[in-house]
Image (spheres, rainbow, N blue to C red):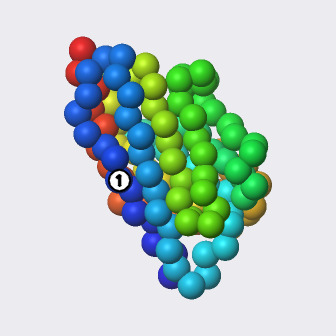
Amino acid sequence: QVQLIESGGGLVQTGDSLRLSCVASGSTFSTPGMGWFRQAPGKEREFVAAIDWSGVNPAYADSVQGRFIISRDKAKNIVNLQMNSLKPEDTAVYYCAGARSQEVVVVEGDMAYWGQGTLVTVSS
């Protein structure tokens, strides 16, 4: 069983930065592609960022390109999401997700493992 535990959410102001972390554990966990998705109030969950097994091939949603940075520490099974220049529209529950593939996975339906989510609130 694979477990993903997110941390780092909170309340910030417009323009602030925040870093989310996701720790993965489980006897079958290797180094799959990992990603972050988010769900804003009243909206469907959407893709934010993803990274492959090597940690050198990221992908971003257009809405966060240039502001968010995804990275991973393979030795510690940690995936981070550095969020800069935050906007009120970034307010959402952020979910860490893991794929069975080692490649970059950006489709929600292709993710096999999910964390419980961490809330990020950006005030104007």
Vertical comparison of 87 with 60: above or below: above
Q: In the image shown, does 79 or 104 lie closer to the viewer?
A: 79
Inspect this view and state whether residue 86 appears: yes
Q: In the image shown, does 102 or 12 lie closer to the viewer?
A: 12
Q: Position of residue 67 (x, y in %)?
A: 53, 23
**Residue under the point 39% across and 23% down:** 86
Helix, strand or loop at disc 1?
strand
Inspect this view and state whether residue 111 appears: no
Position of the C terminus, as image quadrant, is: top left
Q: Position of residue 64 (x, y in %)?
A: 54, 26
Q: In the image shown, does 43 or 2 lie closer to the viewer?
A: 2
Q: Position of residue 43 (x, y in %)?
A: 38, 34
Left or right placement of residue 30 versus residue 17 in this view: right
Q: Say few, some or many: other residues with alpha carbon within 10 Å of mark 1 (under 14 / 14 to 19 / 20 or more).
A: some
The residue pinned by badge 1 equals 7
Left or right placement of residue 95 versus residue 118 in this view: right
Residue 33, quarter of the rendered image: bottom right
Left or right placement of residue 102 versus residue 116 in this view: right
Q: Position of residue 40 (x, y in %)?
A: 35, 35
**Residue under the point 40% across and 63% down:** 5
- Count numbered badges in the picture: 1
Vertical comparison of 122 with 18: above or below: above
Q: In the image shown, does 48 or 22 lie closer to the viewer?
A: 22
**Residue under the point 39% across and 56% down:** 6
Residue 69, quarter of the rendered image: top right
Q: Amino acid at mark 1?
A: Ser
Q: Of all residues shown, which one is farthest toward the front?
A: 75
Vertical comparison of 50 with 28: above or below: above
**Residue under the point 35% across and 53% down:** 7
